[in-house]
DNA sequence: AAAGACACCTGTCCGC
DNA sequence: TGCGGACAGGTGTCTT
């Protein structure tokens, strides 16, 4: 479910409530997430949250000593509760803070993660080898061009690979490739530098606009206030199979590429 | 090293 | 109404 814009929306929503607050208690009701929640997470109890940030789709809570890594997987969400409410189905973890505030982690499919780190986040095996942030300077056409030389993987899989660039998931990959006029199955190594420039702009553009709209709610994404995102209204190809291309009027196609549904216009994308 | 398949899990929707 | 199957926004791990 959540791609970079949804994770960023969540981060912005929770930060004002968590920044500089002290964690009173961590209650784990279901530890079976993607990896079992380690007992270590209780080291967070009594500690102040010094800084909140995001790396790709990982949320990072830096504490006075150590920190927490959260990932929302396909179906996770975080809610801020300002008064006590009984936990509902799939409410797996509560981070209880001072002043009766609580951050509640809900994840029906349990592909998410809730992990403890002793040392720096950068050294963690999940984060160490990640590609650049798509909204940073380090993400540019030269980077994609260089990393793609000699590679025959489909360009869509290439830009969804977190070791190449983080944060681009299934929705925004289809959208950006349409905007850049590149067919999702084209070999990454056969995209010119010039076209990578267009793709970089498209990825930056679609992600920024989605963040402005609070992300995309297709089925069940909600932000930390429980509200949906509104970028779905601006999707050009995703989930539009059989409908007319907004650009040329041809029929939008759907095809499975790398085990994920991909949407594109075969007239506009080459 | 690269590419592809598979795994994890629950909920929803569609056709019969 | 029930049931089986396909599918869903992610990504680490294993096999070729």
Image (cartoon, coloured by chain):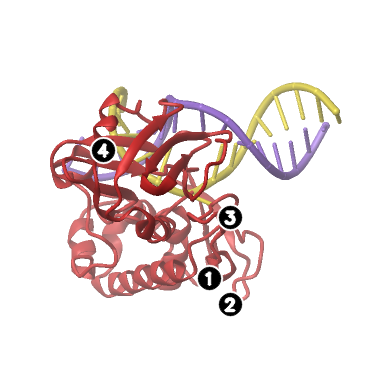
Chain colours: A red, B purple, C yellow
**Horizontal side of residue C1 vs A211, given as left or right:** right
Q: Disc 4 on helix, strand or loop?
A: loop
Give the mark nearest the N terminus, 2 or 3: 3
Q: Do the residues labelled 2 and 1 touch (CB within 8 Å)?
A: yes
The residue positioned 27% from the left and 48% from the top of the image is A61
Of badges 3 and 1, nearer the viewer stands 3
**Horizontal side of residue A104 vs A218, given as left or right:** left
Q: Distance between the residues labelled 2 and 3?
A: 25 Å
Of badges 4 and 2, nearer the viewer stands 4
- Residue tagged 2: A248
Give the mark nearest the N terminus, 3 or 1: 3
Marks 1 and 4 share the same chain: yes
Which label was assigned to residue A218? Answer: 3
Residue A124 point in image, percent of width and height? 18, 40
- Residue tagged 1: A267
Q: Identify the chain of the residue marked 3, using the numbered disc in the image.
A: A
Q: Which of C13 and A155 is in front in this view?
A: C13
Which label was assigned to residue A159? Answer: none
Q: In this view, does A203 lie above or below A131?
A: below
Q: Identify the chain of the residue marked 4, using the numbered disc in the image.
A: A
């Amino acid at each position: 479910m959540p791609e970079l814009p949804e994770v960023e929306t969540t981060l912005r929503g929770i930060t004002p409530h968590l920044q500089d607050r002290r964690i009173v208690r961590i209650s784990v009701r279901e530890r079976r997430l993607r990896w079992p929640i380690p007992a270590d997470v209780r080291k967070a109890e009594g500690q102040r949250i010094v800084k909140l940030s995001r790396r790709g789709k990982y949320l990072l809570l830096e504490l006075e000593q150590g920190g927490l890594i959260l990932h929302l997987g396909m179906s996770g969400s975080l809610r801020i509760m300002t008064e006590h409410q009984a936990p509902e189905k799939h409410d797996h973890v509560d981070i209880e803070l001072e002043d009766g505030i609580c951050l509640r982690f809900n994840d029906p499919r349990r592909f998410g993660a809730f992990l403890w780190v002793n040392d720096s986040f950068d050294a963690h095996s999940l984060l160490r080898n990640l590609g650049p942030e798509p909204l940073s300077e380090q993400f540019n056409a030269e980077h994609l061009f260089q990393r793609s030389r000699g590679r025959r993987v489909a360009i869509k899989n290439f830009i969804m690979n977190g070791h190449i660039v983080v944060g681009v998931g299934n929705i925004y990959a289809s959208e950006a490739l349409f905007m850049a006029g590149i067919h999702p199955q084209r070999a990454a190594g056969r995209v010119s530098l010039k076209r990578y420039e267009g793709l970089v702009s498209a990825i930056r553009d679609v992600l920024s606009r989605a963040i402005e709209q609070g992300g995309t709610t297709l089925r069940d994404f909600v932000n930390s206030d429980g509200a949906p995102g509104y970028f779905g209204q601006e999707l050009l190809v995703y989930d539009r199979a059989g409908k007319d291309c907004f650009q040329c009027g041809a029929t939008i196609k759907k095809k499975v590429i790398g085990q994920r549904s991909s949407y594109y216009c075969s007239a506009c994308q080459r």
